[in-house]
Amino acid sequence: MQKSDSPLESNFFSAKWKTTTCKDKPVSQDYIPLPIQNLVPGQEVPFELLLRIRGAGKTGYQFKTCCSPGQQFEPDWLAKLQGAGINRVYFRQQDQDSVLKYLNESLPVVLDDDSLSIQEKAERVADVTYFWVNQLFADTKTLVVQQLKQGFEYVDHLLAFLRQDHSHRHWLMDLYRHDQNLYSHCLNTSLMSMAFASHLGWEDHKIRELGRGSLLHDIGMTRVPAEILAKKGKLTEEEQGQVKKHPYAGFVMLKAFFPISREALLMILQHHENGDGSGYPQGLKKARIHPYARVLRLVDSFDALVSPRSWRPGYPPVKALWIMRQDWQQSGMFDVGLLVELIKFIAGEEK
């Protein structure tokens, strides 16, 4: 194995909810990072694993094979990677189905491993969930019920971890992904929504539905033209109109699947509705917006603000909450009771 100088993937928040800066930008959409803790020593890897290498005096990166398809991932390799300061390897985008199958098959072993902490197990489940969203959104035309059921099982696992550790604020944000993509946003929003609902004292079945709806809330964005999503400058009025169709598009895509509850569907449809009636797609006012969708509206906005964009870095949590408070003062767009509780939650105050 060759040593990689790839910096460690930083998190948005530390245990004290402070922001850090991510300097490791994506190199190519053809290669997807995989945290090395998801590799099972002594087990065959059915896809190619690659290291990202930057040669001396070179500005670009190269990808070198470190484990060929069907080759056993030797137990000492994990220690060598960690010793070299490497905490992730890469796989080719075309192999993501094999990667998800590999991760899913190894998950029961992880969940039964008493040597792992709650946080470590939650990190593994979050990784699998991320790749599940990636795969699901990549081919929404072939959605099947079993796919949705599998993703919902991940949500159930994450909820169980939140319930096991009431001090989850100290590690919840370690599960956050800061990639500037749709899959990260959906995973982050689902995690934050469930943790926030737990803070609010919701019953488990309600938190579960909130987590499921949050995980899928932006699936309609897969119907927005790729060139619009990739555009770095300001969108035209016509392009904005295309983006504003995504809540209804997601609702239509999922309404025929019986694992999707009415609550989750309404969250997908209403997550851009504002309390003052200025939202979309229906221009609903607060009384007509489902309570789950009101929570999602807040958390969705918070994650969008703390996440980096092509035109700005992510805002610190305090700044993001201040912007949201100003938005509420100017228009009443958020549920003020929920906004107050979100501020308390981010600040670490108990109910």
Image: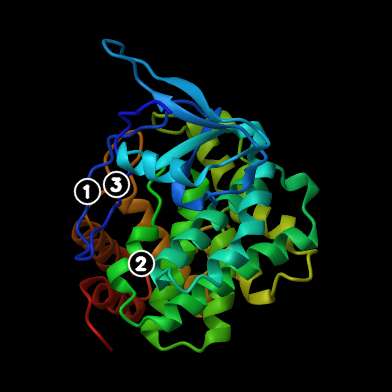
Compared with 142, 329 (above or below) is below
Tell me the SS state at disc 3. Answer: loop
Would you say the residues marked 1 and 2 are in contact, meaning their CB atoms lie under 8 Å apart?
A: no
Estimate the spatial distance between the alpha carbons at disc 3 and disc 2, rounded to whole Å.
14 Å
Element marked by disc 1: loop
Q: Residue at coordinates 56% horizontally, 42% vertically from top-left?
A: 73
Image-based side of 98 in relation to 38, left or right: right
Q: Foreground: 146 or 302?
A: 146
User: Foreground: 351 or 277?
Assistant: 351
- Position of residue 209 measured from the top left corner of the image (x, y, whole percent): 59, 76
| Label 2: which secondary element | helix
Q: Is residue 285 visible?
A: no
Query: Which numbered dot is residue 20?
Result: 1
Identify the amino acid type marked 2: Leu
Residue 80 location, quadrant: top left
Tag 3–tag 1 contact (CB < 8 Å):
yes
**According to the image, label 2 marks what residue?**
172
Residue at image point 67% right, 40% down: 46
Report the amino acid beneath label 1.
Thr
> Who's the residue at 65% across and 50% down the image?
102
Return the residue found at the far top: 57
Q: CA distance from mark 3 to mark 1?
A: 7 Å
- Mark 1, Cα crowd under 10 Å, few <14 / some 14-19 / many 20+, is few
Whether residue 177 can be seen here: yes
Residue 283 x, y percent position in the rendering? 53, 63
**Disc on the earlier residue, 1 or 2:** 1
* Residue 351 against residue 233 in the figure, above or below: below
The kind of residue on which mark 3 rests is Ser
Q: Residue 336 at what x, y percent from top left?
A: 32, 77
Q: Which residue is mark 3?
A: 10
Quarter in which the N terminus is drawn:
top left
- Asked if marks 3 and 2 touch (Cβ < 8 Å), the reply is no
